[in-house]
Image (cartoon, rainbow, N blue to C red):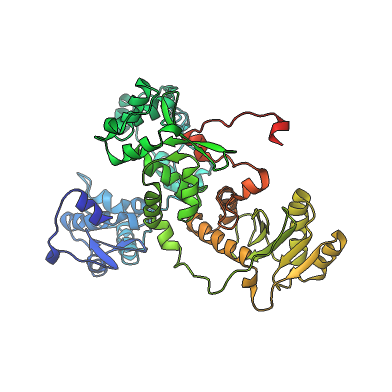
Amino acid sequence: MVLSKLSDANLKLNPSKCKFFQKEVNYLGHIISAEGVRTDPEKVSAVKNWKRPENLRELRSFLGLCTYYRKFVKGFSNIARPLHKLTESKQKFQWTKECEDSFLQLKEALTSSPILIYPQPDKPFILDTDASQVARWIQRLNEYYFDIRHRKGSSHGNADALSRRPCPENCRHCSRVETKYDYAIRQITTSTATPPDPWSDEKVREDQMADPDIKPLIEFMESSSNKPSWQDISAYSPTTKQYWALWNSLHLRNGVLYRKFESEDGKTFRWQLVLPRFRIPEVLKELHGSPTGGHFGVMKTLHRVRERFCWGKVRADVEQWCKSCDACSARKGPKIRSRGKLHRYNVGAPFERIAFDILGPLPRTASGNKYLLVVMDYFTKWPEVYPIPDQEAPTVAEAVVQHWISRYGVPLQLHSDQGRNFVSAVLKGVCELLGIDKTKTTPLHPQSDGMVERFNRTILNNLSLMVSKNQQDWDQKVPLFLLAYRSAVHETTGYSPSQMLFGRDLRLPCDLLFGRPPDTPSSPEEYV
């Protein structure tokens, strides 16, 4: 990051004056490392042998060093108060027992100071503040999100110490504050103006007209419905010529250029927005890197893009984006090539044969979950994932019956590995009661259930990209991953699980963000 900033500013460094790949550095009297910030041992070592100050000059020198490192000493102001009092004007320099205690406490605190860790934005911040009878700042701060917790004054000394300190009458500090600040509560003014929609028809048309590859086509269309000749288009860019070759499928809707993409049999079509070049990163960031993007590979991301947008060299752009994704590069290992031919189990209807497996143990979440029960349909590739607290047979059987069978019906076959929770008497009894044929994978070779094993790798990769640092919120990330997976084209069927199950695509957050031409309305009879 530092080198990137220097490069952006066109600044050069002298290598002889630089140090690279350091585990810790000394910066302004502090040692900075990956663990946090601590005091410089060379600086504070002098404190151990610091003699008791004999005069005001020596005392101020000692306090200057202590004040520089005061953030490492809890309650520094209270500890150092007797020493600071000696530095006041017209105060006789007289070393008392309170001064000696303060001096020794500061030396001990500085020579055994802790490491200050860096702020962690994903964790809550706690502010200790004092209350007031007037000018209640809660009314000025209510535009922010926070919880207020009362703490009695005797336990709130760090914030109440100053307000509870006796103050002499006619205190010049207090009088100056009272005259300087107005205690009247001012009304919080909030703007009611809504920001412009970056994907409105007006904004998209403006961006298309700003794109030199798209603008000529819109101008040709608005001037004439006839396709321009090659001579008319020959002077324009190669990308404009690519769009020109698609002339018969290009249409203006509310002044915005779309491509009408039809299937080979002509039974289905979709509208693709002709996207300006400079808006491509915004789209790829959402369709690949968002929680509902799923950080999937090139083909799934490419299909998701082509469902909504059209631009030149779209495949090359998607490949480059996925290749340069830092999160994918850091988490996803090298692709493992299959050494043998995968024999697919033939099924003829949705939910005829389902497979299930258990992932875990994972870090226990706040909801008490530690495992993932994965259930997947062989025909549609529709997955369900249930966070569960344990992998005992009753828990697994209850989840399958309550969540899968009650929703999708009784399957003909239930396939699993050789885990004891899957071959238990409880699950066997459920299968016998419902008339389900229970099958198992080959012993010591769970890869024979390749569909679920591949899905397991996918969900673990995705969760590793989305969870917080403490990894205790993974069960909250599962629903959005399922939305991403169910709406992505499966390489085996050529359709997304939602298309196989519902006969339509799922509406994603990106469709609300980017906008999408509405589907052709139909009656219930026509839909069925």
Q: Position of residue 353 (x, y in %)?
A: 73, 60
Foreground: 350 or 197?
350
Foreground: 519 or 169?
519
For this orientation, the residue located farthest to the bottom is 444
Q: Position of residue 448 (x, y in %)?
A: 64, 71
- Left-right relation of 506 to 428: left
- Say which residue appears at 43% left-offset and 58% top-offset: 328
Q: Position of residue 49 (x, y in %)?
A: 23, 70
The answer to whether any part of residue 124 appears in the image is no
For this orientation, the residue located farthest to the right is 433
Task: Give the quarter of the image for residue 226.
Answer: top left
- Left-right relation of 260 to 386: left
- Left-right relation of 494 to 54: right
Q: How many marks?
A: 0
Vertical placement of 473 versus 134: above or below? Answer: below
- Say which residue appears at 59% left-offset and 42% top-offset: 505
The answer to whether any part of residue 48 appears in the image is yes
- Say which residue appears at 60% left-offset and 30% top-offset: 520
- Left-right relation of 308 to 506: left
Which quadrant of the rendered structure holds the N terminus? bottom left
Task: Give the quarter of the image for residue 372.
Answer: bottom right
Vertical placement of 524 versus 238: above or below? Answer: above
Q: Position of residue 137 (x, y in %)?
A: 44, 31
Which quadrant of the rendered structure holds the C terminus? top right
Foreground: 216 or 396?
216
- Say which residue appears at 51% left-offset and 55% top-offset: 467
